[in-house]
Image (cartoon, rainbow, N blue to C red):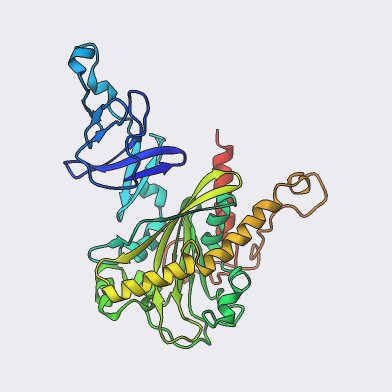
Amino acid sequence: VSRLYVNDPVILSRGENNEISAFLNSCMHRGTVLCSGDSGNKANFICPYHGWTYSLEGELTGIIAGDRIYGTEMDRSEWSLRRLPRLESFHGLIFASLNENVVSLDEYLGNLKWYFDILIGRSDKKMQVKGVPFRWVVNANWKIGSDNFGGDAYHTAMTHRSTVELGIAPKDPMFASYGHQVVLDNGHGLNVITPSPVAPKVPPFQGLPEVMWPMFERNLSEAQLEVFRNTAVIDGTCFPNLSFLSPMHGTGGHAHLTNFLTLRQWRPLSPDKMEIWSWFLADVEAPEEFVEESYKRYVNTFGPSGVLEQDDAEIWSRITSASKGLMARDKTMSYNNVMNYVMGLDSVKSDPTWPGPGIAYPTCYLEAVQRGFYEKWYEYLTKE
């Protein structure tokens, strides 16, 4: 698999020992990109420029006419592909860092792991990715996506007003507020939205097929089951730019309810432009008919041309556009040009009865997660 780590091209490969390695996707001879495709199967990596060949473990194994040209002057072991210093995984999600001294992934994810277990660790055979990731560019700063998915349930009734008018979402303007907003370690956070108290009864486990419920009971704790059983929507952000969304569509009165799970990455291209990568995930054991219906709902709502995705992109681009002028940039002027994140700052107290980790507040109309996100971001910016 080839990906971009910010602006560095990277190769992910599974070697003969079945271990995953990550390298800079660049030949050590002249720097040519080795793999131009997104994914595939190869026995080795051959540079298209001069033919230097590397193993799946990144070792330099072949040079055209190497013995005649270099003789014994060059130690091939010194010219292996450059590895990313740190690489770890959790439930199949691969995380990397260019900082060799960064904390472990376990420590970095912290109490977010408890909620990731509900989303991607609930099945016996874990999750599968359906299709290739969608990719598209939005003229907006990347932090807006992390901010929105991290804890902004408040925008739903206005930005996605069309879903209310079409009967997809409830008419109650408070419908996205029910549940808990949870502030987690290291800038992470999420909303756990529950159905409206006056809404028609909805099935447990976000409408996932009943045949899967025993599997959830095997893999999740009682506290995790309690949260998962009563949830309509889970959305959040793993700081800084990995977000997740697991909604149950049709809670506005439709009899047919369908859940889907998407992970997405907000990749900065510039201060006013980002590339969005979006993956669709499904339980390996889920019935194929359900997976197909779930995928359709995902594409129709949060695909590149999805109804809700287009709503968000329009607003985010407007925010970024308005931030470029003199009045918006000059903080010495007497204008309200600083974004407002005071919702619930002093008025909403945490809920000590929440069964999961983190600081949970009994409403999703709150900006505690966003405050935590920007506090962590500021901490990194000002760290020496």
In this rendering, the count of numbered labels is: 0
Q: Is 339 or 281 nearer to us in this picture? A: 281
> Does residue 362 sit above or below 88 in this rendering?
below
Quadrant for residue 212, please give it. bottom left
Confirm whether residue 209 shows in the render.
Answer: yes
| Residue drawn at point x = 78 percent, y = 48 percent | 327
Q: Position of residue 108 (x, y in %)?
A: 41, 48
Residue at (29%, 25%) from the top-left corner? Answer: 50
For residue 88, what is the image quadrant? top left
Which one is in front, 115 or 237? 237
Q: Position of residue 54 (x, y in %)?
A: 24, 31
Q: Nearer the viewer, residue 49 or 142?
A: 49
Query: In which quadrant will I find the C terminus?
Result: top right
What is the quadrant of residue 248 in the picture? bottom left
Taking 328 as reference, is 80 above or below it?
A: above
Residue in the image at 42% along x and 41% along y: 5
Residue lying farthest to the right in this orientation: 334
Residue at the extreme front of the image, as rendered: 49
Query: In the displayed structure, does residue 173 sit left or right of residue 359?
Result: right
